[in-house]
Amino acid sequence: MLDPMETDLAVHAALEMELGNAHRSGDQDAIFRYAQQDAWCFRSAWVRALLEQWRDEGEDAKLRRVMAAFARNRTKTPHIKLVKEIGRDQEIFHRIVDRPSTVSLSKRFGQLANQSRLSEESIRDIYRALQPLLQGTAAFGRVDHDLFDRLKAMLDAIRPQG
């Protein structure tokens, strides 16, 4: 069984990667979701850098919004539920990437929304959050499927044992 501290670190690392990538991809709201989901968000260098930038630029409203999101932190979400959601998102991402070449991204988003209990916008959000992971892994137009093995290994590291 994993030590609870190891589990917390693994969850933090997974959220930092997912939402940090979303932020680097231009998602301006990623920091607010991160503050709401990870009680350790202020340990992340990109969060500290952005907060210092906002402080220096006088962006008080953004700073208050981050703190409000942090105050509503969802880390209280049961760990098992969080692991299930991460696994679900990874599976959806894999199904998007492995779509038939005749199916457009937009159509695939709709198909997956119909097959899941998620909205099409949620499917798009999953793709936007995880898509930066594909950069540098594709060779000759093919996806390096080791990426999915690495994502699964990260999820397995935080999955409760027993």
Image: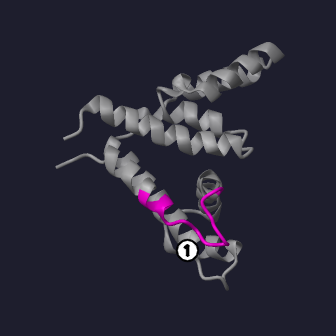
Residue situated in front as seen by the camera: 152 or 88: 152
- Where residue 78 appears, as percent x and y from the top left, is 34, 41
Q: Is residue 72 above or below residue 120?
A: above
Q: Is residue 10 above or below residue 73?
A: below
First to last magenta residue range = 135-149
Q: Residue at x 67, y 26 (%)?
A: 65
Q: Quick check: can you spot residue 76?
A: no
Q: Is residue 135 left or right of residue 71?
A: right
Q: Which residue is mark 1?
A: 98
Q: Secondary structure at mark 1?
A: loop
The number of numbered badges drawn on the structure is: 1
Predominant SS of the magenta segment: loop
Q: Residue at x 33, y 51 (%)?
A: 156
Q: Amino acid at mark 1?
A: Asp
- Where residue 26 appears, as percent x and y from the top left, is 74, 44
Q: Quick check: can you spot residue 136?
A: yes
Q: Is residue 95 above or below residue 28?
A: below
Residue situated in front as seen by the camera: 24 or 51: 24
Q: Residue furthest front?
A: 140
Q: Residue at x 47, y 42 (%)?
A: 14
Q: Residue at x 16, y 49 (%)?
A: 162
Q: Is residue 62 above or below residue 91?
A: above
Q: Is residue 11 left or right of residue 80?
A: right
- Where residue 89 appears, as percent x and y from the top left, is 49, 58
The stretch drawn in magenta includes residue 139: yes
